[in-house]
Image (cartoon, grey):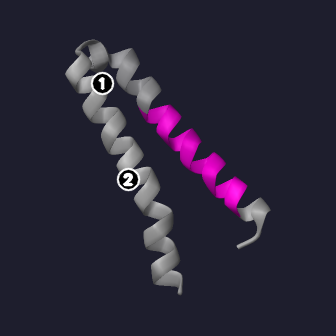
């Protein structure tokens, strides 16, 4: 993968995460600190595992 492809992948994943977090905030779901931590933890976990899983499947 080239650097441009990695940057494009990172940007698209961040936009996906941004859209979901914006929708959760607008719905009022993230008023609790525990809920905000759980959502941010799961976003970080899955956003870091998706490229690794794709890379391993593609290899």
- In the rendering, which numbered label is found on residue 46? 2
**What SS does tag 1 mark?**
helix
What is the x, y in percent for residue 46? 38, 53
**Residue placed most toward the observer, 29 or 39:** 39
Residue 17 drawn above or below residue 23 = below
The stretch in magenta equals 6-20
- Neighbor class of circle 2 (other Cα within 10 Å; few <14, some 14-19, many 20+) is few
- Of the image marks 1 and 2, the number of the one nearer the N terminus: 1
What is the x, y in percent for residue 48? 45, 55
What is the x, y in percent for residue 55? 52, 75
Tell me the quarter of the image containing the N terminus.
bottom right
Q: Which residue is mark 1?
A: 36
Indicate left or right for 52 with 6 as reference. Answer: left
- Neighbor class of circle 1 (other Cα within 10 Å; few <14, some 14-19, many 20+) is some
The CA span between labels 1 and 2 is 16 Å
What is the x, y in percent for residue 37? 29, 28
- Identity of the residue drawn at 40% across and 16% down: 26
């Amino acid at each position: 993968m080239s650097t441009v492809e990695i940057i494009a992948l990172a940007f698209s994943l961040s936009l996906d995460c941004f859209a979901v977090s914006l929708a959760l905030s607008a719905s009022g779901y993230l008023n609790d600190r525990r809920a905000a931590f759980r959502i941010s933890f799961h976003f970080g976990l899955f956003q870091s595992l998706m490229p690794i899983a794709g890379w391993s499947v593609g290899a």
